[in-house]
Image (tube, rainbow, N blue to C red):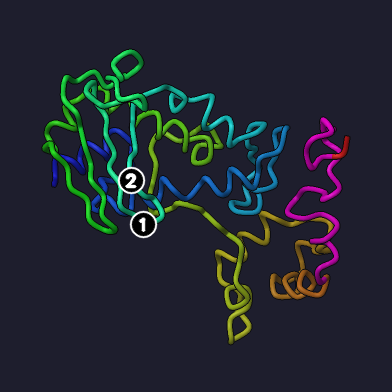
């Protein structure tokens, strides 16, 4: 429904109005793997540099930061009953939702609506006992979605400069496939040339007088050794911080 999509576009501060809710869901799901993969106990640019070629950093323990240092940590009184593995479950929110002991969950339920909001999911179908208007006019629903936006912003706004979000760029990955490096006619696409210049390092001995084709060939000749020693702008032998004896980091 158009009013619901407009509500989502505004709540998530999208640069362009979303036309399909599935696109937004995919965008919201995308960063969690990258946040987990880059979950170091210190600010790091390992994963951001690998995926964006930008000199930006994630905060220490970024996955925990997204979960515990944003509005997502708040208890919104959301209940889920059923089987996730069978994709058959019901999501309930509202002051009438039952708690685990069968009592009303009004004490710490932030969706104090007087009505139980329910969504029934059966595989790829979903139904609700309320209207779209009920959802989009409830301030608590907007607050819950805003907390989700705040959480994914840990990834999508690593530059701290974004004023809106483009869901068409869920993971701005500039890693280049082989056919994007050198085309059959021997030329290099302009975007590839730009990336090569932006990521130029000591492993590629190039000068202003050398061609981009030669520079690219030099980079390919280095093989895997530079990647093994210094993977995506960060030494694999991590010396930034010490562990605590109960993790994968050197104690």
Q: Which mark is residue 82?
A: 2
Q: Residue at x 33, y 13 (%)?
A: 107
Q: CA distance from mark 2 to mark 1?
A: 9 Å
Q: Which mark is residue 178?
A: none
Secondary structure at numbered mark 1:
loop
Residue farthest front in this picture: 101
Q: Position of residue 9 (x, y in %)?
A: 27, 40
> Circle 2: is it few (<14), some (14-19), or many (20+) Cα within 10 Å?
few
Total labels: the figure holds 2
Query: Quarter-wise, where is residue 11 in the image?
Result: top left
Task: Please state the extent of the stretch shown in magenta in the rendering.
Answer: 223-249
Q: Is residue 245 magenta?
A: yes
Q: Residue at x 53, y 40 (%)?
A: 155
Residue farthest bottom in this picture: 185
- Circles 2, 1 touching at the beta carbon (< 8 Å): yes
> Circle 1: is it few (<14), some (14-19), or many (20+) Cα within 10 Å?
few
């Amino acid at each position: 429904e158009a009013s619901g999509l407009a509500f989502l576009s505004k709540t998530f501060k999208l640069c362009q109005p979303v036309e399909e809710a599935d696109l937004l869901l995919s965008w919201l799901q995308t960063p969690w793997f990258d946040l987990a993969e880059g979950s170091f106990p210190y600010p790091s640019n390992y994963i951001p540099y690998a995926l964006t070629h930008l000199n930006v950093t994630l905060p220490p323990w970024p996955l925990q930061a997204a979960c515990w240092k944003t509005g997502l940590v708040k208890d919104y009184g959301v209940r889920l009953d059923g089987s996730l593995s069978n994709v058959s479950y019901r999501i309930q929110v509202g002051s009438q939702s039952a708690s685990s002991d069968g009592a009303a969950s009004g004490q710490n339920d932030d969706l104090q609506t007087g009505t139980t909001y329910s969504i029934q999911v059966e595989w790829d179908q979903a139904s609700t006992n309320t209207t779209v208007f009920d959802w989009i006019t409830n301030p608590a629903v907007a607050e819950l979605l805003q907390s989700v936006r705040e959480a994914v912003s840990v990834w999508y706004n690593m530059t701290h400069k974004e004023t809106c979000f483009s869901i068409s760029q869920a993971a701005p990955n500039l890693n280049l496939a082989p056919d994007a490096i050198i085309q059959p006619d021997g030329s290099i696409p302009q975007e590839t040339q730009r990336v090569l210049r932006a990521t130029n390092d000591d492993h590629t001995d190039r000068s202003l007088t050398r061609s981009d084709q030669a520079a690219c060939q030099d980079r390919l000749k280095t093989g895997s050794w530079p990647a093994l020693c210094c993977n995506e702008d960060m030494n694999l032998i991590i010396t930034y911080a010490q562990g605590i004896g109960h993790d994968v980091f050197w104690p």
